[in-house]
Image (cartoon, grey):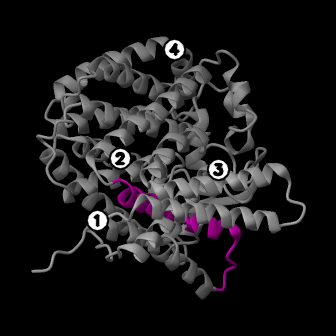
Amino acid sequence: MLNRAPLNWAPPSPSPALLLLGGAAGVVLATIALSALAMVPPPLALAGVAAAALIAAVCAHPPLGAYALLLATPLIAGIDRGVAVPFLRPSEALTLLVGLGLLLNGCVRLVTVGVRAPRLRAVDATIVLMAVTGSVLPLLWMLARGNQITGDDFQYSLLLWKCYGIYLIFRMAIRNERQVRRCLVLAMVSASIVGIVAILQSLELFGVPGLLSRYYAPFGEAKDLNVNRGTSTVASSFAVADLMVINLGIAVGLLARGSRHRLVLVMALALFVFGTIASGQFSGVIGLIVAVMALGLITGRAWRVAAASVPAAVLALLLLKPVVDRRLSGFATLSGLPVGWQGRLDNLRTYFWPELFSHYHYVLGVRPAARIDLFVNGNEFIWIESGHTALLWTGGIPLLLAFFAFLWVSIRTTARIARARTDAYGVAAIASFASLVVLAVLTTFDPHLTTRGSSDVLFALLALACAGSHQPDGTHHPSARR
């Protein structure tokens, strides 16, 4: 019987010399191309050489690309498109460079030892289904109706493909349990920095809002940095809360699997709870509660998870009182809803639902761009702030069903792996399971599936977890309890 290779299957490695030769060739070609361009500014030439060096490094050692993405993406995701890199966010450019390095590595392997076609799994199929129903289908539907496809439509249609690209990068780059463990540590290190910045920003300490205003102002609005909400380096309070919850799952998973670094992990857990409260988002608090329940369920240690999380949450509410008071003051309205929630509902009723539910547009969607270009109260755009509405608006019923299929398959898969393994793969599955359950709940309120920064980490963790179903059981591996 023939054995089919899983998606993260790796053929015998070519010699390091060949990989370095391929990487060096990439550097040389990139340098020659830059030199051939007349009047290239020195900063641009330097950036090109750095990019070529990164591609060569990833080609020589693919895990470096995964490490770079996990460590850097949350710290640069909030920099606007075109500010540091033409047409792209720096985080998107980094993902592209890492992908090119892996592609070059694959080409070297193909020439030297051969590469067998990977096998797609159920999780892959649901992500691809979401990407197709969220891009190809709505764009074709727009053409069929004679509607103009804008740059916004094209940009939004690529978001789910980017998520799948990140998923593939981690499935192909990370090949053993030790590398998975390093990824988990790097994810928490990066999230810790995001959380600390968010806490200081929400309390308006040490001039952090002013420091963020140069590159990390959400949608270019510097005034949004001084409203007792932590947007941090991802320039989104939603993304901050999501990142904190995801990494809370990693910390709890490591504690549940007997890590020796319990004190450090408990401190990290408390920091992630503080960071969630500092985001100033009610949905973040809801996500935190859901995550604690999901983690208790999947680890079988509900009381221990609650005992570690609840005191940290109470302390965070006390120490972050200015954030809590400002958010609670929003309920002092005639409708009883916070001002932000009432604004979201008004926008949905005024700008989105009338068009979505007219002429059966909800069947195949309106357009990929999940925002309307208007000038209202000084803002240039009005976003769809409802997850299910955004799915229907983008791809109609097919995308909504694909999203539910993705949740169903991914939650079942990660739950199975989390219960079967006690090594780093199992920890990644625990964190993925809790994050996916939170995603399922919070999509009712906001579009969290493609939130910049946090979605990158979510799909990376999902890839690491799914790789565990095709690796030898690490339960008794010496590093499983580190």
Between discs 1 and 2, the one toward the N terminus: 1
The N terminus, quarter of image:
bottom left
Q: Is residue 457 visible?
A: yes
Amino acid type of the residue tagged 3 in the rendering: Pro
Q: Residues within 10 Å of mark 3 (few under 14, many from 20)?
A: many
* Numbered disc 2: secondary structure: helix
* Residue picked out by circle 4: 321
Q: Main secondary structure of the magenta part?
A: helix
* Residue 425 left/right relative to 346: left
Tag 3–tag 2 contact (CB < 8 Å) = no
Q: Compared with residue 235, is residue 312 higher up or lower down, i.e. above or below?
A: above
Nearest the camera: 225 or 39? 39
Residue 85, x across and y down, in percent: 72, 53
* Residue picked out by circle 3: 90
Tag 3–tag 1 contact (CB < 8 Å) = no
Q: Which label sits in the foreground, 4 or 3? A: 3
The residue located at (64%, 60%) in the rendering is 27
Alpha carbons under labels 4 and 3: distance apart: 34 Å
Q: Which label sits in the foreground, 1 or 2? A: 1
* Residue 206 left/right relative to 141: right
Amino acid type of the residue tagged 2 in the rendering: Val
Alpha carbons under labels 4 and 1: distance apart: 50 Å
* Residue picked out by circle 2: 441
Amino acid type of the residue tagged 4 in the rendering: Lys
Q: Compared with residue 267, is residue 65 higher up or lower down, i.e. above or below?
A: below
For the record, the magenta segment spans 146-174
Quadrant of the image occupied by residue 399: bottom left
Nearest the camera: 429 or 273? 429
* Residue picked out by circle 1: 9
Amino acid type of the residue tagged 1 in the rendering: Trp
Alpha carbons under labels 3 and 1: distance apart: 30 Å
The answer to whether residue 420 is magenta is: no
